[in-house]
Amino acid sequence: MVKGGKQSTSKQPQKTVLLSIGLTNPTSTIVHFILAHHSPQSLRKVFRQSEDSSQSPRRLFAKSSKTLHKVFGDSLKTLQRLFRDSLKTLRRLFRDSSETL
């Protein structure tokens, strides 16, 4: 983005969601997803703080859980968007294929 003749060099974080679906029985599906989010540094920071910090465990846990909650919340939104996009694509493909028949 160019503002006032200067080019912004800030990079948007990359988000990746890996999804695997396992069928345990015909009536239930368990969805497991591994999240490699835009902020692996946040996760490293959480665990590094737990080693290096002299804070009380309760306070440290509160900070860590807040960071992890944000990371997983953002990843869940990304996952929901991917499902919506996939559903739209499938509907369009189905509509297009039924028109050609």
Image (spheres, rainbow, N blue to C red):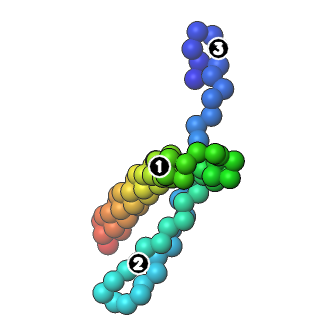
Circle 3: residue type: Lys
Q: Secondary structure at mark 1?
A: helix
Please state the total of marks drawn on the protein image.
Answer: 3
- Which residue is nearer to you in this view: 43 or 34? 43
Q: Quadrant of the C terminus?
A: bottom left
Give the number of the disc on residue 6: 3
Label 2 belongs to which residue? Answer: 30
| Dot 1 or dot 2, earlier in sequence | 2
The alpha-carbon separation of the residues under discs 3 and 2 comes to 49 Å
In the image, what residue occupies the spot 46% across and 81% down?
22
In the image, what residue occupies the spot 62% across and 34% down?
11
The alpha-carbon separation of the residues under discs 1 and 2 comes to 29 Å
**Residue 57 in the image, given as x and y percentages of width and height:** 54, 53
Q: Quadrant of the N terminus?
A: top right
Q: Secondary structure at mark 2?
A: strand
Q: Is residue 34 left or right of residue 78?
A: right
Q: Secondary structure at mark 3?
A: strand
Mark 3 closeness class: few <14, some 14–19, many ≥20 residues within 10 Å: few
Circle 2: residue type: Ile
Nearer to us: label 3 or label 1 = 1
| Dot 3 or dot 2, earlier in sequence | 3
**Residue 40 in the image, given as x and y percentages of width and height:** 62, 50
Circle 1: residue type: Ala
Q: Is residue 54 visible?
A: yes
In the image, what residue occupies the spot 48% across and 72% down?
32
Q: Is residue 85 visible?
A: no
Give the number of the disc on residue 62: 1
**Residue 74 in the image, given as x and y percentages of width and height:** 45, 49
Residue 58 vertical placement versus 5 (above, below): below
Residue 1 vertical placement versus 44 (above, below): above
Nearer to us: label 3 or label 2 = 2
Residue farthest along the bottom direction in this orientation: 25
